[in-house]
Each structure stands twice: as C-alpha cells, then as structure tokens.
Amino acid sequence: MSTRVLFVCLGNICRSPSAENIMNHLVQQRQWADRVSCDSAGTASYHVGNPPDRRMAAAAKEFGITLKGQARQFDPTDFDRFDWILAMDNQNYRDILARDGTKSYSHKVKLMCDFCRTHTDTEVPDPYYGGPEGFTYVIELLLDACDGFLDQVIGHVATP
Ligand code: 4NP
C-alpha cells in the first residue's frame, strides 16, 4: 500500500500544489511512484476550482516541473484519508489542527520545513504578494524539503 501525503497551504494555488507536483516529480525520478500518492489542499476557500497561480507555475517550469491541479479546500475527512499532512507554515498548521474535532490526528500533521536538510527556514514563505524571486525561492525550498521527506518516509517508516 502506498503512503498517502497531503500538502496544505492557505490558497492551494502556490505552495501546496508546488509541493505536490515536486513530490510527484521526485518519486517518478526514483521510480517510487507506486509507493507514494500525493494531493494538496488549502485551509481557505477563496481559490477553490482554480489552477495553480501562473507566477508559481512559471517558477516551477524553470526547474522542469509542470504544475497541475485544481484548488480545493481542506476537509476534516482528509485526516483519515492521508498518512501525512504537511503544513507549509505555522498558521496552516494551527488551522489544520483546529479542524480536528476529535483531537486524535495531531501525530499526522507536520511542518514541511521539518524535512529540510540544506535550508534553515522553519516555514515555507507565502509568495503571493511578493515578486518573482519569492516564487523561485519556494521551489528551491520545497525541493530540499520534499527530498528530505522522501528519504525519511521511503527509507524508514511508511506512516508517522
Ligand atoms: P498559497 O498562496 O497559500 O501558497 O496558495 C496564497 C494564495 C492566495 C492568497 C494568499 C496566499 N490570497 O490571499 O488570496
């Protein structure tokens, strides 16, 4: 059975779809596509149904990664449907846990940057209101975090 991973940010049009598509790219490179399945969601509903932000897609393209997907909002049923729920920033982390009425899923919820190995950031910064360099930085950071996450999950345990 594959490990199911959900990436979560605020709008699900910049950071979490990037993480999802970067992870799919890495698992394909390593021929692990049958062992990891990915999805992404936003804590907010503003952009539901929208494709990834075009500035985010342009930055990803520079790294050879095509962003696919349509925004959706995080749903409490996601707690059961995924093994790992990776939050991009501290606010996302709090908003996810606030939807856990049973208070029984906190072991599945982690910060994406916990898996970084070369960056010291603790959060993936929100690039939405900034310039193009912010979008490029998000891709660099997520490549580091996703690579570290994959090594940990595939190398060690299948569930948190
Ligand atoms: P994301 O970025 O959470 O990485 O998808 C944002 C997208 C939209 C907004 C903020 C952040 N917004 O305010 O509409």
Image (tube, grey):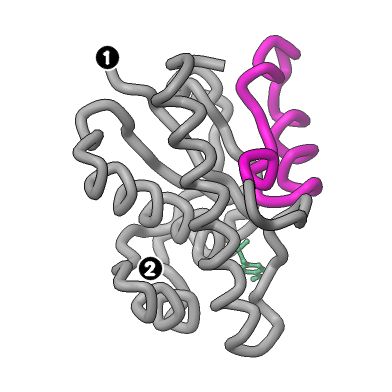
Query: From what the image shows, is residue 59 above or below residue 51?
Result: below
- Which secondary structure lies at badge 2? loop
In this orientation, which residue lies closer to the viewer: 4 or 45?
Answer: 4
Of all residues, the one furthest to the bottom in this rendering is 131
Quarter holding ligand 1 = bottom right
Residue 14 falls inside the magenta stretch: no
* In this picture, residue 133 sits left or right of residue 120: left
Q: Position of residue 160 (x, y in %)?
A: 57, 16
Mark 2 nearby-residue class (10 Å; few <14, some 14–19, many ≥20): some
Q: Is label 1 or label 2 in front?
A: 1
Picture quarter containing residue 37?
top left
Query: From what the image shows, is residue 46 above or below residue 101?
Result: below
Query: The residue under label 1 is which amino acid type?
Result: Met
**Residue 1 circle label:** 1
Q: Position of residue 105 (x, y in %)?
A: 65, 16
Q: CA distance from mark 1 to mark 2?
A: 29 Å
Residue located beneath label 2 in the image? 51
**Residue 79 circle label:** none
Q: Residue at 51% across / 28% down in the picture?
A: 152
Q: Which residues fall within the magenta stretch?
A: 88-116
Query: From what the image shows, is residue 114 above or below residue 46?
Result: above
Callouts 1 and 2 close, C-beta under 8 Å: no
Q: Residue at 64% across / 79% down in the picture?
A: 134
Picture quarter containing residue 4?
top left
Query: The residue under label 2 is which amino acid type?
Result: Pro
Badge 1 residue CB within 8 Å of ligand 1? no
Residue 105 falls inside the magenta stretch: yes
Q: Position of residue 64 (x, y in %)?
A: 30, 72
